[in-house]
Image (cartoon, helix red, strand yellow):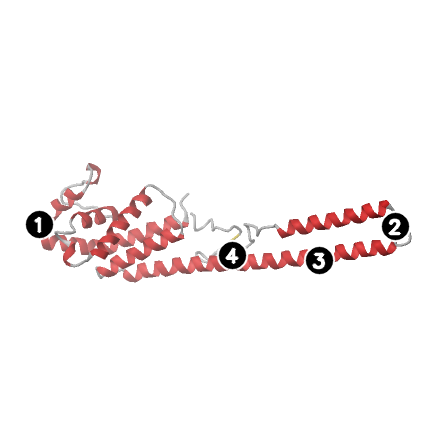
Amino acid sequence: MPTGNSERITRVLELLTEGLTPYVEAKLRLIYKENWHRVVKDSFRDDRSRGALKTIDWDAHTLLTVMWDQWNSVFRHDLGHYERSLVSELREFRNRWAHQHQFDFDDAYRITDSIRRLLQAVNAANLPAIQQEKEQLLESHVAEAVNSQVQRTAHDRNKWGLIAIYAVCCGLIITNMVFDSVDDFTPGTFALISFVLVLFVYLIYQQFKLEPPLLFGPRECHRCHRIVYRKSCPYCEG
């Protein structure tokens, strides 16, 4: 089952393809004229990437490969070393995505931002779309972090409240037992007081080391706005 970050990366790679294709084709046509199809085919590393001579099935892999191989001949006239480093970085991330590697928020945000920067450098028409993806990714991450912190704060507040109740109850019970047996304090009474004390110390200790639960109960997913009962949203996970 793909994770939400993998799905986001799939979407931004599609936006990369959409935004880069007109630019790459235009630059190749400008330099190589009618031979640009052959040049593109020569950049492919295996026969599976080759199609009919006049058909180019553009995707993130082919676009980034062609830009890397034809950098000195075609793209260095408009783009600089920074943009070339973006192409190299995105090739690596794209290969990891193709091999179904797991991506965390930092990976997803970096990929999205690098794609935005590359599309901005070529004045892509869909730049607002990738900017929106970046903002939604950051908003979702911050919202989940805030929700987790709110839930942790509530858990800690309830935990310390319960510890205080245990401590007060323990003190009241032991005090009452001591006053009731002040004239006839037997070993049995001492044993009972010791048992009560150990019991409440154990209960307080269990509360003290209790970690916040992974399931916070019903809440609204900040991405799809559905009610979910788990820390991760099953609807966004697919």
**Helix, strand or loop for disc 2:** loop
Q: Amino acid at mark 2?
A: Phe
Q: Amino acid at mark 1?
A: Glu
The disc label shown at residue 148, or none = 4
Q: Amino acid at mark 4?
A: Ser
In the picture of the structure, the residue carrying the numbered disc 1 is: 34
Looking at the rendering, in which quadrant would you find the N terminus?
Answer: top left
Residue at 9% x, 47% y: name it. 35
User: Is any part of residue 124 visible from this angle?
Assistant: no
**Helix, strand or loop for disc 1:** helix
Cα distance, mark 4 to mark 2?
51 Å
User: Is any part of residue 7 visible from this angle?
Assistant: yes
The disc label shown at residue 165, or none = 3
Question: Along the horizontal axis of the image, is 203 left or right of 98?
Answer: right
Question: Along the horizontal axis of the image, is 144 left or right of 205?
Answer: left
The disc label shown at residue 185, or none = 2
